[in-house]
Image (tube, helix red, strand yellow):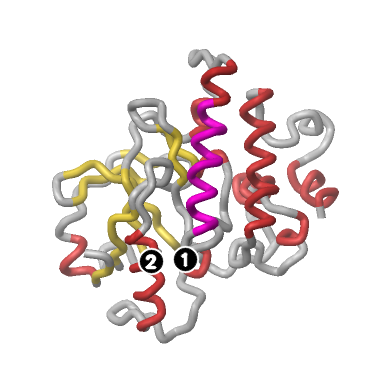
Amino acid sequence: MIASTSSAMSSNVKKRLTKDSMRRLKAKFNGQIVYTKPIDQNPMTDADTRNTLRPHTIQHLLKLYALKHENLTKFMAIYQSSADLSHNFVFIWEFCSRGSLGDVINNIDIKLDWTFKASFLGDLIRGMKYLHNSLIQTHGYLNSQNCVIDSRWLLKVTNFGINRFRELQSLEISDSHDANELLWFAPELLRNNDPFLNGSQEADVYSFAIIIQEIVVRDKPYSTYANHLSTMDIIARIK
């Protein structure tokens, strides 16, 4: 099932277990451990309501569902939950047990030699090449938290193709966590009123370059400036 309203889908999504830094919720769906990703508001139009999705919205979801590549997480379903009215949509994605690339990079107990680093970069390149050549064409929200690692240490890109569902965001960032999300965005997107809603393949390449820096130096984006500049100051200079 690709899309559903609350009654049918929610019965298949069991207890939410944990929540990570990107608001991914670990849950059970049809007896399988999955990640659920809540999206706060559908910006497309009011025609996509709690009970009805427009035909071209469904077509977009079908394109997501059709994507199959070892370096992309599988999009499994979307549902609208009457139990959690703060979110219009919840996306259900394949679960990867080792967490995000960002988690791995920042875990000093995990040894990453150059073979490991090169493997992650190769996985990311293959996943993004497939995505850019697909009908989805862009990720739009690529960062190290949206790259997840499975039990075999295979990197998979996740949370692609969801920009059109995201809440319209302004650059009036409410807290440091929101601001940190912008560090992977290309300058041309940051100059837009809503960088989350827009995306391009060129902007994905910019985000990819930031991830390369994270992997190579094992630190956060723009880490050389973090000691004397706030996140918002860094973003202002990028723009």
**Kind of residue indicated by mark 1:** Leu
Q: CA distance from mark 1 to mark 2?
A: 7 Å
Q: Quadrant of the C terminus?
A: bottom right
The residue nearer to you, when weighing 57 against 196, is: 57
The numbered dot on residue 116 is none
Across and down, in percent, residue 236 comes to: 82, 52
Across and down, in percent, residue 202 comes to: 69, 56
Q: Secondary structure at mark 1?
A: loop
Q: Quadrant of the N terminus?
A: bottom left
Across and down, in percent, residue 39 comes to: 44, 61
Callout 1: few (<14), some (14-19), or many (20+) C-alpha neighbours within 10 Å?
few
Please tell me which residue is depicted at 51% across the width and 33% down the height of the picture: 101
CB under 8 Å between callouts 1 and 2?
Answer: yes
Residue that numbered label 1 is attached to: 135
Magenta residues, dominant SS class: helix
In this picture, which residue range is highlighted in magenta? Answer: 119-133
Residue 97, compared with residue 237, is above or below; it is above
Residue 192, compared with residue 146, is above or below; it is below
The residue nearer to you, when weighing 99 against 152, is: 152
Please tell me which residue is depicted at 37% across the width and 65% down the height of the picture: 89
Is residue 58 shown in magenta? Answer: no
The numbered dot on residue 63 is 2
Judged left or right of residue 26, residue 178 is: right
The residue nearer to you, when weighing 175 against 105, is: 105
Across and down, in percent, residue 233 comes to: 81, 46
The residue nearer to you, when weighing 8 against 128, is: 128
Please tell me which residue is depicted at 62% across the width and 48% down the height of the picture: 181
Residue 78, compared with residue 153, is above or below; it is below
